[in-house]
Image: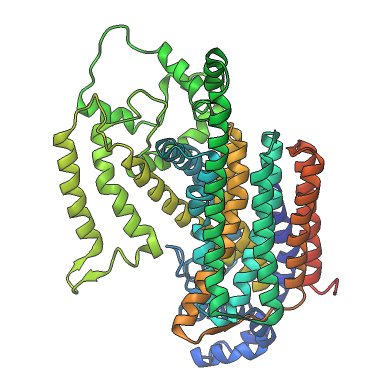
Amino acid sequence: MPTVLLMLFCTLALRWDHASCQQSVYSLAYESNTQRMDLGNVCSSDSLAGDAVDRNGDECDVVMNLSSSQRCEFVKNTPDCASDEGFINYPWVTFCLFSPHLLHLIITLCVLWLFVLFLVLGLIASDFFCPNLSAISSTLRLTHNVAGVTFLAFGNGAPDVFSAMAAFSHPQTAGLAIGALFGAGIFVTTVVAGSIALVKPFTVASRPFLRDVIFYMAAVFWTFTILYKGHITLGEAVGYLGLYIVYVLTVVVSAYVYSHQKHQLNSSIQSSDRAHEDILNSDAYWETLSGSRQAHDEEYEHLLPYTQSTTQIFLNAINPVDSRNWRRWHWSGKLLKVIKVPIEVLLLLTIPVVDTDKEDHNWKRPLNCLHIITGPLVCVLTFQSGAYGLYLIQGEVPVWVLTVCIGVFLSALVFFTTTNERPPAYHFLFSLLGFVVSALWISTVASEIVSVLHLLGVVLSLSNTILGLTLLAWGNSIGDCFSDITLAHQGYPRMAIAACFGGIIFNMMFGVGLGCLLQMFHHNHIVMLEPEGSLCWVLSGALGLSLVFSFILVPLQCFHLSRVYGVFLLIFYIVFLLIALLTEFKIVQF
């Protein structure tokens, strides 16, 4: 992640002088005509930047070619400047609320806001998303490989799939979706996978690793063939979804066969050896997450029976500050905690967390009853930027009001039929709710990151192609990066590497498949996909080469991912990014 941020700052620095110079030239050209220009004249000025619009397909890029007095009106009347993914219209805030002389300050604030959004993503992934994933996997008795290619892949892939579906809805941006999916694939297989190896060197499961690489290579080759043809048919789009179903079935069947063989092996061993084997292969995989925390908590347990009131349970449950550790923290840790407290309280009030390692499975009766109201409410207000939550049923009742009413009824039912001391039999359902709500929070924050990065691209005159390769791919992969690295840091590197490949396989197959299917339903049964210059082939070649390296080098290392291999993957991505930038700016041509 630090590597990605460093690349971002380098790009900002390199492009800022060029953008400032270009802005000055166009401002001088328009300054003499400012008083006699209306909106029609402003829009006609697009011809001065026609080459940029034709190349990028994004009319919002023209705003930096206008004078300062014209930018606000242009942003208000240009659809490309109105983001429908996030909640904040960043171009309008930048060019209408702030003075043009504060543009440098706005860029600085955007970078700081990005850090806050990154911090929120990491918090959601580590404290809410991953614990609920662990609870779901334990409840369903799933192996870490199966959990990685199903639940974690679905949660991580939401921003990528939604972005791809939105891009495929417009034929002129269909190539951008392919570029973003390929760019995200390279980022995940190099930066994320390399970071996992750096955080937690481990020996990967040979068969699952080869299976994932082969399936993803097949998906990439299929997409490369479609790009070479220049179009995709209905059967090929449906084939993407079918291929992923085959992939999931392969994972499930292989996990079942392995479990059956392991059971037969254990049954043939003597009882003493079998008991010892059971201890080694039981749920220790999931217990490592909070074993030390349990030992620490037991030290502070009350010696005498102690019963908390409902109010005390609620207040303690939404308190993110551990007073026992507060005095031990460094001042920087305390400062960071103060910044995170409002965010943590909001997340605690909206996301239930089930912890199967605790005796009561983290059952907090008053807070969990509140989650029945706030969890679904967050879902309807964050999905599609709240468009469905504000929809009026028969033109009278908003969806969010109906959601609150149903939530209040169910919450009251749960509250009066349960006790504070013992969780109900259906408590595991709260882990499903927590998983869905945390995944939507991740998707929402990732959408805001994409919107901020798009604004930086507009201000710094970066093309849509390079935005799809870098900024859009980085923004959509932030959830993958934090979730997978967090899993590896907590001792689950095999699940993280399975999610690493399972997530991008899901993104590629569902992103292209569903995106093209939706466009076919609205238009015709063939979608044209025209690669934008040679950069698309650089993307395809780099992704294919990274997969070939993984397919050859990992088995040669006896499937052990060391820190040296992690550094190699990071260097590979840096070299690829340099070549892609040189190709985009026509310094290198293929």
Q: Image quadrant for the C terminus?
A: bottom right
Q: Where residue 34 sits in the image (x, y, percent)?
A: 56, 87
Residue shown at the point (19%, 43%) measured from the top left: 411
Question: In the picture provided, is 17 more to the left or to the right than 522?
Answer: right
Q: Quadrant of residue 309?
A: top left
Residue shown at the point (64%, 73%) measured from the top left: 464
In the image, is residue 341 above or below residue 432?
above
Question: In the picture provided, is 303 more to the left or to the right than 449?
Answer: left
Residue shown at the point (46%, 78%) measured from the top left: 76
Q: Where residue 372 sits in the image (x, y, percent)?
A: 26, 45
Q: Quadrant of residue 312?
A: top left
Q: Where residue 241 sits in the image (x, y, percent)?
A: 52, 66
Using the image as rendered, state which of residue 466 and residue 506 is in the foreground: 506
In the image, is residue 430 above or below residue 356?
below
Question: In the picture provided, is 275 more to the left or to the right than 481?
Answer: left
Question: In the picture provided, is 490 more to the left or to the right than 136?
Answer: right
Q: How is the image coloured?
A: rainbow
Q: Where residue 32 sits in the image (x, y, percent)?
A: 62, 88
In the image, is residue 492 above or below residue 186?
above
Q: Disc count in the image?
A: 0
Q: Is residue 27 visible?
A: yes
Using the image as rendered, state which of residue 278 and residue 27 is in the foreground: 278
Q: Is residue 461 visible?
A: no
Using the image as rendered, state which of residue 287 and residue 3 is in the foreground: 287
Residue furthest top in the image: 303
